[in-house]
Amino acid sequence: MPDLKLPDPLARRHLMEGGLDPQKARAYGEAYLAAGREIEAVDFLAMADAKEALIALRTAAIERGDVFLMRSACGALGEEPTSATWSQLAEAAVAAGRERDVETARRLAKATA
């Protein structure tokens, strides 16, 4: 779908509630990714069952130390991160200077150990 216009928040909510066919959901997810809006892409990618894109987002979350993206991607995949994954994410968060994510990831690593 060339030049797919991203919906405003209300239209996005209506799209999510009304359901989309997987192809259109994937197109919206990819459009959000292209716009650098990963969190908003997750729901559309989940609707499209785009596991490879969600796995890529999970990997990006680990590399950047992004707890929120990790939770979103894993939730869409129906997974729970392991203690080792949270620890790895915490170390990346330290390197990125994401102090709040460091604290949260370390707490989650202990809780899942």
Image: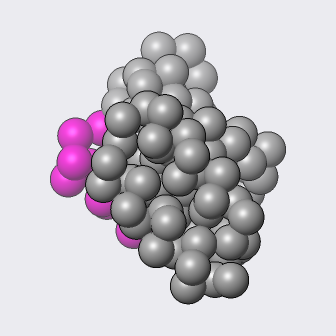
Say which quadrant the C terminus sits in: bottom right
How many numbered discs? 0
Residue 11 coordinates in the image, percent (x, y)? 26, 49
Left or right of residue 100: residue 79: right
The answer, for residue 24, to whether it is visible in the render is no
Magenta residue check for 15: yes
Residue 68 coordinates in the image, percent (x, y)? 42, 56
The answer, for residue 105, to whether it is visible in the render is yes
Residue 54 coordinates in the image, percent (x, y)? 68, 49
At x 73%, y 64%, the residue is 84
> Camera-side residue: 71 or 16?
71
At x 41%, y 22%, the residue is 35
Q: Magenta segment, principal secondary structure?
A: helix
Magenta residues span 7-17
Say which quadrant the N terminus sits in: top right
Judging from the image, the colouring scheme is one colour
Left or right of residue 31: residue 17: left
Above or below 83: residue 6? above
At x 52%, y 74%, the residue is 108
> Camera-side residue: 78 or 61?
61
Query: Residue at the right extreme?
Result: 52
Instruction: State the image quarter where residue 85 is shown.
Output: bottom right
Query: Residue at the top extreme?
Result: 3
Residue 43 coordinates in the image, percent (x, y)? 50, 56
Magenta residue check for 34: no
Above or below 5: residue 27? below
At x 39%, y 54%, the residue is 101
